[in-house]
Image (spheres, helix red, strand yellow):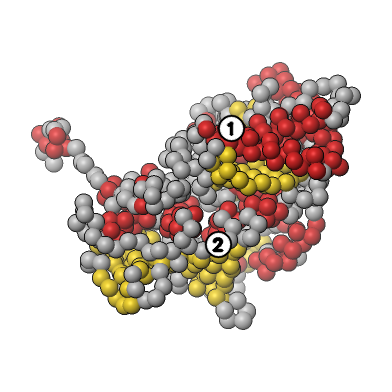
Amino acid sequence: MSEEKKHNYSADSIQALEGMEHVRMRPSMYIGDVGVRGLHHLVYEVVDNSIDEALAGHCDVISVDINENNSITVRDNGRGIPVGLHKKEGVSALEVVMTKIGAGGKFDKDSYKVSGGLHGVGVSCVNALSDHLIATVHRDGKIWQQEYERGKTLYPVKTVGETDITGTEVTFLPDTSIFQQTTEYNYDTLATRMRELAYLNKGITVTLTDKRNKDDEGNFISETFHSTEGLSEFVKYLDSTREQLTAGVISMEGEKNGIPVEVAMVYNTSYAENLHSYVNNINTHEGGTHLSGFRRGLTHTLKKYADESGLLKNVKFDISGDDFREGLTAIVSVKVAEPQFEGQTKTKLGNREVTSAVSQAVAEMLTDYLEENPNDAKTIVQKVILAAQARHAARKAREMVQRKTVMSIGGLPGKLSDCSETDPAACEIFLVEGDSAGGTAKQGRDRNFQAILPLRGKILNVEKAMQHKVFENEEIKNMFTALGVTIGTEEDPRALNLSKLRYHKVVIMCDADVDGSHIATLILTFFFRYMKEMVEQGYVYIATPPLYLVKKGQKREYAWDDNQRDLIAQKMGGSVTIQRYKGLGEMNAEQLWDTTMNPEFRTLRQVTIDNGTEADRVFSMLMGDEVPPRREFIEKNAKYANIDA
């Protein structure tokens, strides 16, 4: 390119990318990312169209198939996307819906009162990011079809047969040039979302079938999700791994100020607060006005009841809103005609009118329940009083942690071997199992940007511990002070302050055995319950040390699983020596650096939260008090486990 052209910045230099081209150029703007999460989001967008038909009262059966080639087929028994001529565009309405960003019935209030999806870009966005897509519509006694490649139509909409049913079928194959990390769908991830949708929309039936795998009887792996009770069943499912404090589920369903509101909640013996909120089936994990309304209604009603019943007359300390939510699992679902979300990712609701609607609904529901169930009411208030006592103890323990951070030399624990770099974005810290492995890691690390914090033994299981016990635990105090984060304010005792976070990579490095896996799970439980924002922002990783060293003469290669070990041994040929690493301490500093710590060769697994409700259920199941759900999980998954001899 000539120097003249390089510097000739004119109107012709501006690229005006519209519609499908812009989606392909900037896919993360539309689906969040082009990794595993974005890949699965494509399915959710197509299913959302079918759910919208269900919300409008025209659909009650949806099926999702994962095909052998990892394409996806979604079918419903709705009205079918209109196929008639669109006056403005001059082509079939089906083609408009599939190829025009912002087109669809969701913008027509007569077609859909409420809907989810990505501000109307859903199915056309999926089309743009698919290598191939086929849309088949059963409508008006005929079967209509159109195919697309990377969002472009291959032929006009045509009839391919006759039918006596209605509905829409979409089959799409994700574009490997967009989804370069993977195009392989995870069955469990999709099953979690389909189950969630069935609970949130009682009466509909959602079937998920994996045509890539068969069970012992030769049938495709498949599950059908259906709920008759809605959120009441959902909250029972989420809380099935905890010991319930009250006899039944406290629930309500109705309409306030023209806004449909559904709430279900239970109290349990745990110390965690688990609130999950949805708007038009979208999981608003950052909350918003509907969650504010729930908290307001809950606190006001319970406080009023406790005062009027005299249950607080001997309490000498203040009780806050947080105390009313300890040990509470609740789901709030609202349907809003014109939701205002903060940001493209739709994680926080902004409609102010929703606050009072949910608050009123919760107040009425709770008032009736407390009056009709005085024994449960007394049990709940006693739990609240205990929570307040624990909060006061936790505040003192938390202040000790923060005082230690300020008073100690540099505010850092003595066991920490820090790095010289001060930019958090360039720094990483390894949380290492045991002093021995910690010593090896200190010798092998790059001191410029890698810090080492050895952890002694198994840290406290925070799932079963009161908050003040967590802050009193020495290993947890060391993690808080090393990371530079603080927790708790007068307004919100659980608020996490990451403004002074010292490392943007926190790497959990444990032995590759059963004990190591348990320690890693304990640390992950701590992060999920007390530093969830760090996980959500992508700061937490798990190291993957090798399982084997394969040697023959001077040749040495590492293997991370049994298959890789066997392939290396076969490649080397003849008699080889295989060393099994059960602990990090069995490697010297050079080996640990080469395999597990060197950014050029190591493999780090980033910890993400695909579904907060399911993550909450799994942590409580694996780390909580209830044994039967854990036993059932182990029996179901034992065939995937590696048990050390």
In terms of secondary structure, where does tag 2 sit?
loop
Q: Is residue 64 visible?
A: no
The answer to whether the residue labelled 1 contacts the one labelled 2, judged by CB atoms less than 8 Å apart, is: no
Question: Which residue is denoted by mark 1 in the rendering?
Answer: 356
Residue 508 location (% of width, % of height):
63, 45
Q: Is residue 348 above or below residue 125?
A: above
Residue 48 vs residue 367, the one in the foreground: 367
Q: Residue at x 65, y 62 (%)?
A: 579
Residue 611 vs residue 327, the one in the foreground: 327
Q: Residue at x 67, y 61 (%)?
A: 580
Q: Residue at x 89, y 24 (%)?
A: 314
Residue 486 location (% of width, % of height):
65, 27
Residue 181 location (% of width, % of height):
43, 55
Residue 345 vs residue 579, the one in the foreground: 345
Quarter of the picture containing the N terminus is: top left
- Residue located farthest toward the top when viewing the structure as drawn: 407
In terms of secondary structure, where does tag 1 sit?
helix
Q: Residues within 10 Å of mark 1 (few under 14, many from 20)?
A: some
Residue 71, located in which quarter of the rendered image? bottom left
Residue 462, located in which quarter of the rendered image? top right
Residue 202, located in which quarter of the rendered image? bottom right
Q: CA distance from mark 1 to mark 2?
A: 29 Å
**On the rendered structure, is 468 left or right of 520?**
right
Question: Which residue is denoted by mark 2 in the rendering?
Answer: 204
In this view, the mark in front (1 or 2): 1
**On the rendered structure, is 302 left or right of 252?**
right
